[in-house]
Image (spheres, rainbow, N blue to C red):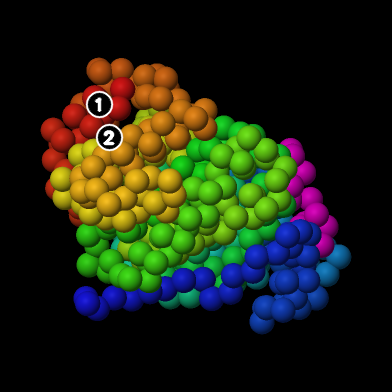
Amino acid sequence: MNDFIFNTTPSIRHMSGGSARLGEILNGLPFARQQAAVMLVTDPGIMKLGLAAPAIDDLKAHGFNVTVFDSVEPDPKASTVLEAAELARSKNIACVVGFGGGSSMDVAKVIALLGCNSQPLEEIYGVDRAIGRRLPLVLVPTTAGTGSEVTGISILTTGTEEKRGIVSPVLLPDIALLDPDLTLGLPPHITAATGVDAMVHAIEAYTSRSANSNPISRALATQALDLLGANVREAVSNGDNREARANMMLGSMLAGQAFANSPVAAVHALAYPVGSLFHVPHGLSNALVLTEVMRFNAPECAPQYAELAPHVFPDIRVGRSSQAIASEFIERLSALNCELGLEPGLRHVGITEADIPRLASDAMNQTRLLVNNPKEVRMEDAARIYQASL
């Protein structure tokens, strides 16, 4: 067995309705004091829906001064982070709360770092370049997909429209608060895209060729797929099913723990340009390229795909060659995307053959991810995958 390191969020709290007790929870942290300044980082949609209101009210009821930063956009820009970090410093923020999807949580992580750290943002892109201390950090996901609440990863969009990652255990929060009630009534298309996103995390973590690939991540990935595969249809078709929502949120978190330590690969590398250039939500971007990347990888990792298949589709017939099981697994994942109402190809999000060279070129910049793929991806391979995904 190779040497490995496994890091995760030190306190994970799965509490239905827990977001309405956020002030009570923060009161137990070392920074807590009367009139301590807390910044809640979220997006305009969360505020419009009123999802954050009970959390904000409880923070105020427990004596915290609350500053709300609600300007996080999809594929958050580095400029947004810098604006929020400056606000945090001016308000003497003592704790940061990321409340929302992956974008809000990713922004909150970097605000917590820059809020008390002199490192320039440009110097911390990459792996283990963020050092030093950060502000206390609590993350509250409102979707079951990104797993960002248990990853030391933040993905930002630079001025060149390229997505760049900051990867460091320093970004792991002090507390991840999983409140499945926040996902009740989430629209079916968002539930579907984020659910498939979480599946991608588990699949890529299980098959990752990272030097830190490890048995803990693989065990978490299979448990995540057990939960996600058994509940995603019900969560999409019946958004008020609390048990399905709770299982999806737990599955997403487990997949997040898996890929935080056994990193994702070519699906994400090819999905990032789709999101950046065409403003496609991250979960949907992953879904659109997933099966073609898996077909490309299958010659190298059919046995692993065959091991994963029954965790998503318990009725899949085993006792055959790994190649046969892997092939059926890929075809059934493709059918599942359609069953969940996700667009069946890149053309449906406005991508044409003329866009493929730019997409392939940008994907090759994701060296941090491509190195983890089971099979080497060259630019011509990326172009063929995009072509097949049209």
Give the residue at x 27% y 55%.
Answer: 304
Above or below 3: residue 250: above
Is residue 153 in sight in this rendering? no
Say whether residue 36 is left or right of residue 389. right
> Looking at the figure, which quarter contains the N terminus?
bottom left
Q: Does the segment drawn in magenta span residue 56?
A: yes
Residue 292 shows which numbered tag? 2
Image coordinates of residue 362 in percent, x first then y, are: 26, 37
The secondary structure that most of the magenta stretch takes on is helix
The magenta stretch spans which residues? 48-58
Amino acid on which the number 2 mark rests in the picture: Glu
Please state the horizontal and vertical placement of residue 285, each as a whole percent of the image. Answer: 40, 35
The disc, 1 or 2, on the residue closer to the chain's N-terminal end is 2
Viewer-nearest residue: 36 or 242: 242
Q: What residue is drawn where x is 24% and y is 24%?
A: 387
Q: Which mark is on residue 388?
A: 1
Return the x and y of residue 113 as percentages of the image width and height.
49, 66
- Asked whether disc 1 touches disc 2, contact meaning CB atoms under 8 Å apart, the reply is yes
- Residue type, mark 1 in image: Ala
